[in-house]
Amino acid sequence: MNTPELATRQHDALTLLRRARIMPVLSLASAEQGLACARALAAGGLTAIEVTLRTPAALAAIRAIRDAGLALTVGAGTVLDAAQLDAAIAHGAEFIVTPGTPPALADALQRAPLPVIPGAASASEIMALHARGFRTLKFFPAAAIGGIAALKALHGPFAELSFCPTGGIGEHDARDYLALPNVPCVGGSWMVKKEWLDAGDWAAVSASARRSLGG
């Protein structure tokens, strides 16, 4: 059910995405690595990051980044169920991203006290989320489900919706996605390559982040 509170949180999600433009998606080996990476991304001019809950270190990394007081908004991604949602919130996540949104998770997201970006991959999924009051969505896995062409087609029937496409996007085509009227932000991991993180090459991370913003 759509509520004024959900509408406000969806507006906050859209504001966050518009400000960010580029959303790094991080899979982290440790909280220390996450904090160093976050500092490098902030130095490169980025303003928001998504830490995926794919590794045991993810929640501790979210807490460490949040506690560091960086000029960076940290969210939790790959949130699959209500238990993970609650854990992410408890560890200081400032927004939530899901790869898909089954009904039970949609119920939990509607009640969540922070901005949420639920995932969808088809017109039917988008319609179901729209009926619940969601207006700011993740489009995943973007490249595999039609990429730019699909988002152009979706703009017709869903002109009031905004999407953050993630999956298969790189430095070579991020700006093409951002040129679409329904794409305020793109997500990806090209600026946080595993070899850079493993080697602690934070200068490479910062430089890639800067290039992503056109710097």
Image: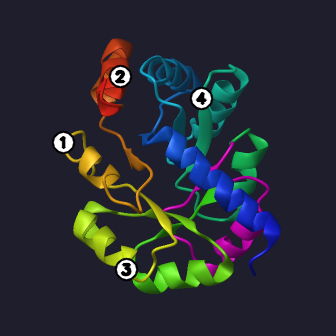
Mark whose residue sits in front, 3 or 1: 3
Res. 24 in view: yes
- Residue at the image position 18 percent from the left and 42 percent from the top: 172
Mark 2 or mark 1, earlier in chain: 1
Mark 3 or mark 2, earlier in chain: 3
Compared to residue 107, the image places residue 208 above or below, namely: above
Magenta segment: 94-115
Circles 3 and 2: CB distance less than 8 Å? no
Q: Tell whether 116 sits left or right of 179.
A: right
- Residue at the image position 54 percent from the left and 60 percent from the top: 98
Helix, strand, or loop for circle 4? loop
Where's residue 7, x and y in %? Answer: 72, 66
Helix, strand, or loop for circle 3? loop
Q: Is residue 103 magenta?
A: yes
Q: Could you tell me the amino acid type at mark 4?
A: Leu
Snapshot quadrant of residue 59: top right
Mark 3 or mark 1, earlier in chain: 3
Compared to residue 58, the image places residue 85 above or below, namely: below
Camera-nearest residue between 26 and 199:
26
- The residues bearing labels 3 and 1 have C-alpha atoms spaced at a distance of 26 Å
- The residues bearing labels 4 and 3 have C-alpha atoms spaced at a distance of 33 Å
Q: Could you tell me the amino acid type at mark 3?
A: Gly
Mark whose residue sits in front, 4 or 2: 4
**Residue behind mark 1:** 172
Mark 1 or mark 4, earlier in chain: 4
- The residues bearing labels 2 and 1 have C-alpha atoms spaced at a distance of 16 Å
Compared to residue 197, the image places residue 2 above or below, namely: below
Which labelled disc corresponds to residue 72? 4
**Residue behind mark 3:** 156
